Image (cartoon, coloured by chain):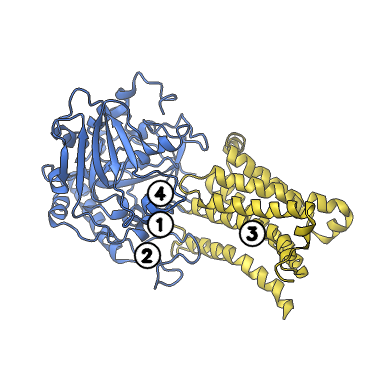
Amino acid sequence: MTFLAKPAVFLLCLLPGAYLAYAVYLAFSGGENLLGPDPAQFLSLETGEWAIRLLILSLAITPLRYLLNWPYAFRFRRMIGLFAYFYVCMHLLVFLMFLLQWQWGAIGREIAERPFITIGFAGFVLLTLLALTSFNAAQRKLGRNWKRLHRLTYAASILGVMHVIWIVRSSYFDAVLYGSLVLLLLGYRLLRKYSEAVRKFSILG
Amino acid sequence: MIIKTRKEIPSSEITPESVYRERRKFMKTGAKAAFGVAGAGLLSSAASAQTGDALFARAPADINLASKPDWLVEKAAMRTDAPASGPFNTDEELTPFEDVTTYNNFYEFGTGKDDPARNARDFSIDPWTVEVSGEANKTGTYTLEDILNPHTFEERVFRLRCVEAWSMVIPWVGFSLGDLLKRFEPNGDANYVQFDTLVDSDQMSAQRSRFATIDWPYQEGLRMDEAMNPLATIATGLYDDILPAQNGAPLRLVVPWKYGFKSIKSIVAIRFTKNMPNNTWRDLQASEYGFYANVNPQVSHPRWSQASERRLPTSLFNPRRIDTMMFNGYADEVASMYADMDLRRFY
């Protein structure tokens, strides 16, 4: 039954996007409005939420593999990472299409003048690079450098968390949660590098 | 992309009284219909629907009050109509009751836009007192009836512009703040007036949160001349009924030429002060939120532009993006108060 695992994870990752797509379809076809009176803003927040959650989940794969002594964890890493990129693309699309209506002048100004948008966009550029080199062929071609290149995920997650912190108005909860998780997941890797004890440690013998 | 500009109404186009009243009647029945129909709500996550409702159903717009004092309901129902033209009315499309009452920034009840409508259950406005203190002769503790009864309620249709760059047009019920403040006889040292919102973590669950950015009570203030301007309003209702809990029951400010965060809700204290008082958003982040907070398209928020706004409700392909107007379009009535001020410095 393990062959069902990947399709199952695929469908789970797709679920939020499918719900949002359904809500958008309803809005267009004159059905019920599930998006509230400010749908563009709502879509921007939702796609952003799922992007950062999946990005953090992809960062958690390696720690899980070692802490649970579970080699099969790596199977899911690329899929989850690419889904994070998918939600980032949707997030950017909502911004360009619904919030700024393809006005390139305004878009350029926002990216240049609003720091939180600058780092968000920088994160997108990094993730695009990682997405383009995520395929088996790229792994083969790049060899050892592939691993080094994909450590850019760390930078991308830090940029993502900064983007979230910078937009805080109402509650620190998200910023604290995502920030702590990224810190933990990166911290674990650092410890693994320098400590034999950490390398050996696993929760399930 | 739709750009709307405010039209100055020439006298030849002022809506005839009969047409206006017909429109009011239509809007009244529309608003009452909205009560009964499952209204708008945001799903902040797939699982955030009301208990008992289906996943895709939405919570009905509800005014969320434990009781509605009869005297207050009668006064709101007897409110006079807004004049056909002038700053207390506008020919712009009203934001539906549903959206006005389910899309709120009222962090005492939670930080999601749909949290106040969902969490302000059975909010108690009876008894309610307002503590008046500071540089005035008639300070003391006043009941809600003491505060509101002497005044005649009017309909006031104002634009409300949030600092987050969205806006609504809302038919408030209320009266001029200045008429209330005069009764307390502020003395010569009263240069400013400050207001507090209720602190009650039993009713306002988010006041217990450790992640809140706000140090309760929420506070706001006005310079005395701003407070005495006829446009500064004490609102006690909207859409012909008394205020829902999520909109700041039982009384709130509406200062239409300033960003929405100045329009403090659920007032329990009024303080006349000599020096500029604290206001919450400036306390939190003075580099972004000032004391004056006048709507000003020329002065950006550090993190986003204020040159335009989304007039709610929008839809995905009708974003209703409009140019923001200086003083939210109320320049004629308020600009003179700031004639000598550098509004880039005093934002």
Which residue matches tag 4?
B312
Residues at discs 3 and 2 both on one chain = no
Residue with the mark numbered 2 = B59
Q: Amino acid at mark 4?
A: Leu
Question: Disc 2 vs disc 1: Cβ atoms closer than 8 Å?
Answer: yes
Where the N terminus of chain A falls, by quadrant? bottom right
Q: Colour of chain A?
A: yellow
Q: Amino acid at mark 1?
A: Asp
User: For mark 1, what is the residue?
Assistant: B114
Which chain contains the residue that carries disc 1?
B
Q: Earlier in the sequence, mark 1 or mark 4?
A: 1
Camera-nearest label, 1 or 4: 1
Cα–Cα span, label 3 and label 1: 25 Å
Relative to A38, B98 lies left or right: left
Q: Which residue is mark 3?
A: A54
Residue count near mark 3 (Cα–Cα under 10 Å), binned few <14, some 14–19, many ≥20: many
Q: The residue tagged with tag 2: helix, strand or loop? A: loop
Q: Residue, x 57% and y 51% (percent of image)? A: A94
For marks 2 and 1 on the same chain, the one whose residue lies earlier in the sequence? 2
- Callout 3 secondary element: helix
In this orientation, does residue B88 appear? no
Please give the name of the residue rendered at 32% of the width and 32% of the height, measured from the top-left corner.
B330
Residue A176 in view in this figure: yes
Q: Secondary structure at mark 4?
A: loop
Q: Output the chain of dot 3.
A: A
